[in-house]
Image (spheres, rainbow, N blue to C red):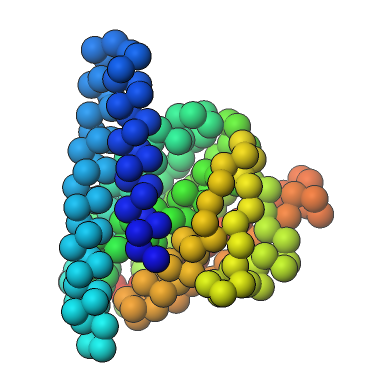
């Protein structure tokens, strides 16, 4: 399933190359950080697959990961899609350490949730990322103000055998694998995931989806 996340980075690189081919020197400079982030995370994901295979019985090796810079990296990777939809992403995340794997947290957890938030947000929408320290836990909330989820989708969201992909607000396609993978990784971290959603059809004035992740604080 991690191949789902590797494909995201090829998409980033392909989009950046298109901009470079048709753009100016200024546009080239703006694409370089995004391309670098996609490249290093794509390489890291291939290593992660090997590690997960080797440690399937023992579990994924965990270490202290700086949350603020990890969230910033995830946003950078998604920058092209954020710009395409003219979205505003507000991040208020302290540089606190959580117990995780940096590659999996960047791509399979934060990256997948942010990708969904972009996919289901309307043009010019808002995405908010916040983190609060609660004793020995860090609570991370990623909130969009998009179309929300129907109850049936929420029920099967983490079931890889039943989950299905819905088209985004701009017709974006998906695989339905991102959310089951995200929760599996968070569970491997010893964390939890909760989801709150209000479907636009039933709540026209206040709708969207919030993913709340709780991870162990370290150091």
Residue at the far top in the pictured view = 24
Residue at the far bottom in the pictured view = 57
Of residues 65 and 177, the one nearer the viewer is 177
Q: Give me the residue at 36% from left, 50% from top.
A: 7
Q: Is residue 182 visible?
A: yes
Of residues 201 and 53, the one nearer the viewer is 53
Image height of 39 relative to 2, above or below: above
Say which quarter of the image contains residue 125. Answer: top right
Give how far across and how far down residue 15 sits, in percent.
Answer: 37, 31
Q: Quadrant of the N terminus?
A: bottom left
Answer with left or right where residue 105 lies relative to residue 48.
right
Residue at the far right in the pictured view = 202
Image height of 96 relative to 161, above or below: above
Q: Is residue 134 visible?
A: no
Q: Give me the residue at 49% from left, 29% from top.
A: 84
Give how far across and how far down residue 14 sits, in percent.
Answer: 34, 33
Q: In which quarter of the image is the C terminus?
A: bottom left
Give how far across and how far down residue 87 sits, in percent.
Answer: 51, 34
Image height of 120 relative to 185, above or below: above
Q: Give me the residue at 61% from left, 36% from top.
A: 170
């Amino acid at each position: 399933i991690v191949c789902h996340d590797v494909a995201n980075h090829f998409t980033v690189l392909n989009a950046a190359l298109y901009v470079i081919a048709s753009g100016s020197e200024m546009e080239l400079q703006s694409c370089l950080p995004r391309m670098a982030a996609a490249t290093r995370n794509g390489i890291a994901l291939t290593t992660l697959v090997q590690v997960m295979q080797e440690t399937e019985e023992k579990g994924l090796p965990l270490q202290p990961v700086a949350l603020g810079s990890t969230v910033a990296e995830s946003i950078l990777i998604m920058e092209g899609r954020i710009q395409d939809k003219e979205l505003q992403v507000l991040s208020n995340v302290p540089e606190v350490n959580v117990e995780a794997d940096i590659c999996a947290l960047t791509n399979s957890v934060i990256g997948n949730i942010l990708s969904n938030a972009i996919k289901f947000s309307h043009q010019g929408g808002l995405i908010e990322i916040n983190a609060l320290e609660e004793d020995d836990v860090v609570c991370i909330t990623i909130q969009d103000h998009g179309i929300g989820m129907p109850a049936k989708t929420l029920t099967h969201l983490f079931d890889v055998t039943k989950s299905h992909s819905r088209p985004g607000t701009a017709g974006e396609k998906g695989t339905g694998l991102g959310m089951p993978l995200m929760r599996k990784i968070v569970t491997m971290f010893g964390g939890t995931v909760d989801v709150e959603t209000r479907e636009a059809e039933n709540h026209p004035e206040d709708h969207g989806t919030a993913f709340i992740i709780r991870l162990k604080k370290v150091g």
